Amino acid sequence: MKDMKVTESILYVGCNDRDIDLFESQYHVPNGVSYNSYVIMDEKIAVMDTTDPRVTEEWLSNVAEVLGDREPDYLVIDHMEPDHAGNIEKLAERDPKMKLVSNAKVFTMLPQFFDFDLTDRTVTVGEGDTLSLGNHTLQFFLAPMVHWPEAMVTYEQSEKVLFSADGL
């Protein structure tokens, strides 16, 4: 993986899919698409979204490379569309202590996409709620119907980085 630092502690672990010719089976994408996912390294580690299942192995490799011998504490789910959330179950199986962080609508939708036990694994956030990772604080804002009804965005306060789901 090419070193893709957003900041010293926010690292890009997403993947490019140059083999896809139609995004969502309708939009022509002659140069392919990127599936954006990030890791925030701090006292606690947060993975920000996953990727489409088309790039599972590459994405898991990118995440493992960034994490080294550490495990993520949280997976923040901003949006349930498969290009953002297609590998939730894979990461949850790989890291069974990791908590899933999102809003109530996401946790209502999750069983429609995946079949794994969520017992004691969820952290439900609402409008304006925060989550401290140590030096980084995530703040959550609901953005229903920006694309899907469960969408939210996450703002990292110390470095002023917005994880915008499909908002931009």
Image (cartoon, grey):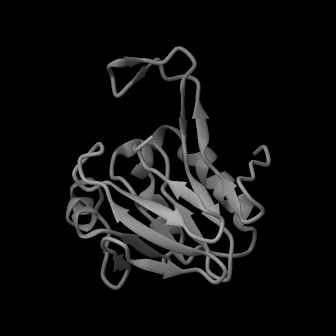
Identify which residue is drawn at 30% across, 58% down: 114
Q: Is residue 155 left or right of residue 77?
A: right
Identify which residue is drawn at 78% across, 43% down: 2
Q: Observer-nearest residue: 37 or 94?
A: 37
Q: Observer-nearest residue: 41 or 156?
A: 156
Give the percent coordinates (x, y) of residue 5.
75, 53
For the N terminus, the image quarter is top right
Give the percent coordinates (x, y) of residue 106.
27, 62
Identify which residue is drawn at 37% across, 79% down: 123
- Please give the count of numbered marks on the rendered protein: 0
| Image quarter of residue 161 | bottom right
For the C terminus, the image quarter is top left
The reply to whether residue 86 is in sight is: yes
Identify which residue is drawn at 48% across, 79% down: 131
Q: Is residue 64 above or below residue 37?
A: below
The reply to whether residue 97 is in sight is: no
Give the percent coordinates (x, y) of residue 67.
70, 67
Q: Observer-nearest residue: 13 or 96?
A: 13
Q: Observer-nearest residue: 119 or 48?
A: 48
Q: Is residue 78 left or right of residue 158?
A: left
Q: Is residue 36 above or below residue 68?
A: above
| Image quarter of residue 129 | bottom left
Q: Is residue 71 left or right of residue 27?
A: right
Give the percent coordinates (x, y) of residue 7.
74, 58
